[in-house]
Image (cartoon, rainbow, N blue to C red):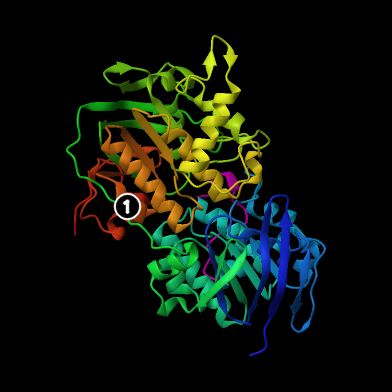
Amino acid sequence: MTALIALEGLTKAYPGVVANDDVSLSIAPGEVHALLGENGAGKSTLVKMIYGLVKPDAGHMQMNGTAFAPAEPRAARAAGVGMVFQHFSLFDALSVAENIALGMEHPPAMRTLSQQIRDVSDTYGLPLSPDRTVGDLSAGERQRVEIIRCLLQEPKLLIMDEPTSVLTPQEVEILFKTLRKLSAEGTAILYISHKLEEIRSLCDSATILRLGRVVGHCTPSETSARDMAEMMVGTTLKTPMRAGKTPGDVVLELTELSAKSPSAFGMPLREISVQVRRGEVLGIGGVAGNGQDELLAALSGETLSKRGMVGFKGNDVGLLGPTARRALGILSAPEERLGHAAVPDMSLTENAMLTGAAREGLDRGGILDWAGARRFAETIIKTFDVRTPGPANAARSLSGGNLQKFVIGREVLQRPELLVVNQPTWGVDASAAAAIRQALLDLAENGTAVVVISQDLDELMEISDRFAALNEGRLSEPSPAQGLTVDEIGLMMGGAHGMEVAHV
């Protein structure tokens, strides 16, 4: 079959790194093609060249046998390329229809557009009302807005970057039905994901990148997830191991904790009560937007707790701010990497100083030890294999996964007594995810109480001692993680709160 799009010898270099080195691949109409690779392997740069966001230094592309070199995304869209980015670009205060109109070159009248949205929604099994305010939507519904915006342009090639990272199993199944229908109609799909079992279920073929070069191809349905992961990293993949020690004394105790959300579209916390012991990993699942950010803020001290108690080693710390809690040993890593966990335009050294000043002894009577901060940043980079030229580089220069490794490593290496992390391996490749999970298990083994908030159910079952679900700001009664099925956890995430799950 003639290729819909063909890439020949694409090369793109930045100062200090070759992002893509002589990359070639082709995708046929109706083919679902996976693009696999570690963080920093060059996947994002490659799709940005296809979408007109980046110009290649060498090589060329063809679409339907003719030269294809989009100077900007508008030109790529006009040629039939649509892209759904990992990070949604939506305005919370606007309606679904208004957001979709903003992404169109020549939007029709709002009444006409609303009907088009309903038609596409019904045709592709993506239930969504054009009149709803985006700020009230779940993560899965927000993704539908982005997909419908692309589908209204009738793309020949749809690029999807980490599309299931914040979805429940039920939402993933809806998405996959949609993608299979598009494929059957002849739309080609270029699919980027670190969830290899999903790749095996959905994709017809795969191209593997390592350090910017193509290192292999495979048929995912005929290749195990471990084999694909090892092709990506070039080494044997290590499985996280835990010692299974008995948890110790209570470190964190929440008693009927309630808190308003600082955001108009956020979710207030409602009477949360739970204990976490020394050496224990408590996994908290939940569909995005059900209070995850608010819970982390209440535990880190970004939000002060006036209703209920935040107990740390027997003392109420609910009215202490983040700096005071860090000094006590309460550390956290939020979901949003750029702008919350790290300042984009600051160097890695400066970002290491931001949270490490107190516990690493970098602030001595108001004098900042920048040499010490640089050494701390270098230790994070080395220990967590952060792919960057050095600690002087800005946080925004790192790929999403490498910045995530830096952020998690920065907190882990400060020896917390309580560590709270939200989405610790979001957008991180299989090898790095295994390393991060092992680091969290090692912390617990050494006596740290660990709270992991995640939408990755496999991750939660792998590392958690107990599991609880967060839904509409309420936390279910924790259950032993061992023996829980993905279906049981998915149901808890989707609506079972205030009760212990019954095994089936």
Q: Is residue 437 above or below residue 414?
A: below
Position of residue 390 in the picture relative to residue 299 (left or right): right
Residue 244: x and y in percent read: 20, 44
Q: Is residue 447 above or below residue 194?
A: above
Position of residue 115 in the picture relative to residue 318 (left or right): right
Q: Is residue 427 above or below residue 304?
A: below
**Residue at image point 66% right, 39% down:** 394
Would you say residue 454 is visible in this rendering? no
Most extreme residue toward the top, as rendered? 365
Task: Return the residue nearer the eye: 445 or 219.
Answer: 445
**Residue at image point 67% right, 84% down:** 3
Q: Quadrant of the N terminus?
A: bottom right
Residue 400: x and y in percent read: 57, 49
Most extreme residue toward the bottom, as rendered? 1
Task: Return the residue nearer the eye: 247 or 291.
Answer: 247
**Residue at image point 45% right, 49% down:** 425
Query: Which residues fall within the magenta stretch?
Result: 124-138
Q: Is residue 164 above or below residue 78?
A: above
**Residue at image point 40% right, 32% down:** 269
The amino acid beneath tag 1 is Pro
**Number of numbered discs:** 1
Q: Main secondary structure of the magenta part?
A: loop
Dot 1, crowdedness within 10 Å: few (<14), some or many (≥20)?
some
For label 1, the residue is: 240
Residue 89: x and y in percent read: 65, 50
